[in-house]
Amino acid sequence: MGIRVIRSGLLTTIQDLGRFGFQKDGVIVSGAMDQFAHRIANILVGNEESEGALEMTLIGPTLAFEEDALIAICGGEFEASIDGQEVPLWRPILVKQGSVLTIGHCRVGCRAYLAVAGGFHLPKVMNSQSTYLLARIGGFQGRALQKGDVLLLRESGRKLELLRFYKNKTLLPFIAMSWGISFGLRAYFYGSPKTIRVIRGAQFTDFTTQSQECFLTQPYEVTPQSNRMGYRLDGPSLERKRSTEMVSEAVTFGTVQVPAEGKPIVLMADRQTTGGYPKIAQVIAVDLPILAQTRPGERIVFRDISFEEAQRLYLQREFELKQCKKAIISKMGE
Amino acid sequence: MLSYELIPLSENALVIKFGEQITPDVHQRVRQVATYFTEHHVEGIIEVVPAYTTVTVYYDPVQFAKNTNRKSDIEVLPFERICTVLKNILSSLESANTPQGNEVVIPVCYGGEFGPDLEEVARRNQLTPEEVVDIHTNGHYLVYMIGFAPGFAYLGGMSEKIATPRKNSPRLHIPAGSVGIAGMQTGVYPIESPGGWQLIGRTPLQLFRPHHPQPSLLQTGDRVRFQAITREEYKQLQEENNGDSCYS
């Protein structure tokens, strides 16, 4: 039963929307890098948005389905197929027992999420299913998936309904629903260089006028030293007017820190809870999924907006997701 | 009363900042505010993170966008709304007492394979290894904040007589429980990690317990002392710990 891992892919981990409530204990939040794609994948299979899903990175896994499952894959443009037949992303897919899903290279973007109706049968550690690699807790045995692992699935009413409807109507190894997420909603990670909007950080004005200007106009390249913890960027060095020591304080997803050597670092899902480098900017929440879909070698340009606008965009995005969820639920009911 | 600023960090986090100086008053106020939020549920507030001079509050902007006064044309954004809530709480707290932090004794087996840098710390400070251990165990330490790694405490109060710069090249694997010195700081590695601290000993205590309701043994505001133990005592304590731990 469950889903057996035939090939693990480059870095495939279980992630939910993060481990909250323990940052005071130094426990990092973790969670999905692209929370937009993660949430949509869960919505498409009728889960809570915060359910744990598989996060794959650049090269996806090969998975053997030892039971029927309703899945959705959302995020970067990965090649996905069952028995040589392409499996569409951003749609609910009913996968029949015995099928092998091969997820290959990512053509555009960087990460995708595979959600399964009912969720994975894995315990929560500190209220979360997210994998915390460094502390080896959460997710699947606290680590990335490996060949031979078997992921057990929880029951799902939605899946059973669909099975009753489709099961005997076809011999195909999978059935893709005829509807999915519109291109407009899922096209957020195309184009180059990508524009990443920020609000100014608490120490923005500590930087020289020239550095402030460089940061907001010049392209920065995502270096290979970038991972779930943070993106190290290469581009014009940023200098402060005076090099005063800062006392450490909390940092968050999207905080842009500048260490002494002057190259900015954007903190991502596996960031530490606190940091002591000056904060030049904060990536706005609705643009974090764009950054999460940016891979090493790609270039980005920062553009600043007001904090008021960032808050409005945040609320608007939440409203859109709510509308999207309503629409999907009514589609499912048909 | 201590003044403070409310500074946005992101759309869902803000920093309550009590200045730039690490003083006993500031530390007390940080603890008082952080303790309030761990003991009281406030609708829309997700968690708080105390640090040296700040308390960072994580919140759900959607919760603070609700109940907009429809009669008014003026838009009130979540940040403004949570600031009003926080200001009320902070002013009501002004006279409240915060209980002292716990006293925690950390048993340490110094030197040998557990503390490969004890001799170097001694040599650099023109002391004997025994003197380093005496000075380290006689210190009274205060947990200013938890961060860097799960269960890692930033401790204040180490004697400058044993201050030692970090190693030139960091070690790739430092075992959990290792007690180290870096400059004027001392601390314990809660989980195996790479690091550049000078290692003087190791504790059998688990500083990070993922299945415990309070995963970090040490909490901001705790007072810490180190106690020298023998290798036999270390082994004995380690076995006892493993017995009642479900950490795997």
Image (spheres, rainbow, N blue to C red):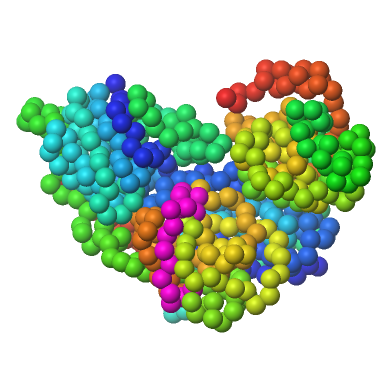
Please give the name of the residue rendered at 33% of the width and 56% of the height, measured from the top-left corner.
A321
Please give the name of the residue rendered at 13% of the width and 36% of the height, measured from the top-left corner.
A84
Where does the image place residue A96, in percent across and percent down from the top left?
Answer: 18, 29
Q: Is residue B8 visible?
A: no
Residue A224 part of the magenta segment: yes
Residue A255 part of the magenta segment: no
Magenta-highlighted residues: A215-230
Quadrant in the rendering for residue A252: bottom right
Query: Does A238 sit above or below residue A165?
Result: below
Please give the name of the residue rendered at 36% of the width and 61% of the height, measured from the top-left corner.
A298
A296 sits left or right of B109 in the view: left
Q: Quadrant of the C terminus of chain A?
A: top left
B149 sits left or right of A101 in the view: right
Q: Is residue A263 visible?
A: yes
A155 sits left or right of B153 in the view: left
Q: Nearer the viewer, residue A42 or B204?
A: B204
Q: Nearer the viewer, residue A115 or B136?
A: B136
Q: Nearer the viewer, residue A101 or B61?
A: A101
Where does the image place residue B138, in percent across and percent down from the top left?
Answer: 92, 40
Q: Quadrant of the N terminus of chain A?
A: top left
Where does the image place residue B212, in percent across and percent down from the top left?
Answer: 63, 32
Please give the name of the residue rendered at 69% of the width and 38% of the height, measured from the top-left corner.
B189
Query: Does A242 sit above or below residue B221?
Result: below
